[in-house]
Amino acid sequence: MKVTIFFGSKSDTDIMKKAAAVLTEFGVENESYVISAHRAGELLAETVRAAEKNGTEVFIAGAGLSAALPGVVASLTVLPVIGVPIDGGSVAGFDSLLSVVQMPKQIPVAAVGMNNAANAAYLAVEILAVKYPGLREKLLDFRQKLQDDVRANMGPFVLA
């Protein structure tokens, strides 16, 4: 089981490394590439094809500004693509958010919240858990721990 992570600029590294950390925590092999859909389209296409040949089953793509990267990746593969809109600054990331969630019909991209690469990885784990029972068990254990943590800290509290 493998996930390939793309992001459009080195400046996105701190955000996108959160996806790699979650995938690694769950034992999911992953690799990352900085490739601009606008500046290196042919290289992106070559890399998507190579990733598929090397066992990638889900793609995560993060981008800011026009955020074309997730959609371009989706146009190159029939595998699931999860888009991470990244705040590019000038319009508080709304441009990238809309670019990721407003894909044309027939070429979907799943979308997570702004700068939320970790959630993209959790979604990738859920997708892969459909096929891999061991990963499903890890995910169930993780969810149980979340619930146990909430239960342990839920109160009652006296609010003054």
Image (cartoon, rainbow, N blue to C red):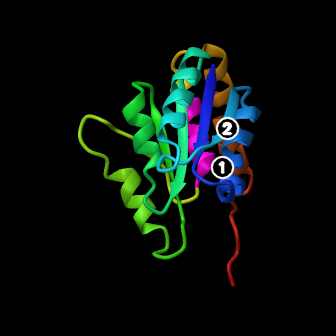
In this view of the protein, which residue sits in the foreground, 149 or 136? 136
Q: Residues within 10 Å of mark 1 (few under 14, many from 20)?
A: many
For the question of whether residue 115 can be seen, the reply is: yes
Which mark is in front, 1 or 2?
2
List x then y, in percent, for residue 47. Answer: 57, 29
Residue at left offset 40%, top offset 43%? 71
User: In this image, 19 relative to 59: left or right?
Assistant: right
Q: Classify 148 as above or below 158.
A: above
Q: Name the secondary structure under disc 2.
A: strand
- Let me know if residue 126 appears in the view: no
Q: Point out the stretch of residues depicted in magenta.
A: 116-125
Q: Main secondary structure of the magenta part?
A: helix
Kind of residue indicated by mark 2 = Ser
| Helix, strand or loop status at disc 1 | helix
Snapshot quadrant of residue 26: top right
* Residue 62 spot, x, y in % from top left: 55, 49
Magenta stretch holds residue 43: no
Residue 120: where, in percent of width, then height?
Answer: 56, 43
Q: Residue, x 65% and y 56% (percent of image)?
A: 12
What quarter of the picture does the C terminus occupy?
A: bottom right
Question: Is 117 one of the magenta-colored residues?
Answer: yes
Kindly identify the residue that appears in the image at 43 percent across and 50 percent down: 68
Q: Quadrant of residue 104?
A: top left
Q: Residue 70 or 36: which is nearer the viewer?
A: 36
> Type of residue at label 1?
Met
What residue sits right under mark 1 in the picture? 16
Numbered tag placed on residue 32 in the rendering: 2
Give yes or no for contact between labels 1 and 2 (Cβ–Cβ under 8 Å).
Answer: yes
Relative to 20, does residue 63 appear above or below in the rendering? below
User: Dot 2: few (<14), some (14–19), or many (≥20) neighbours within 10 Å?
Assistant: some
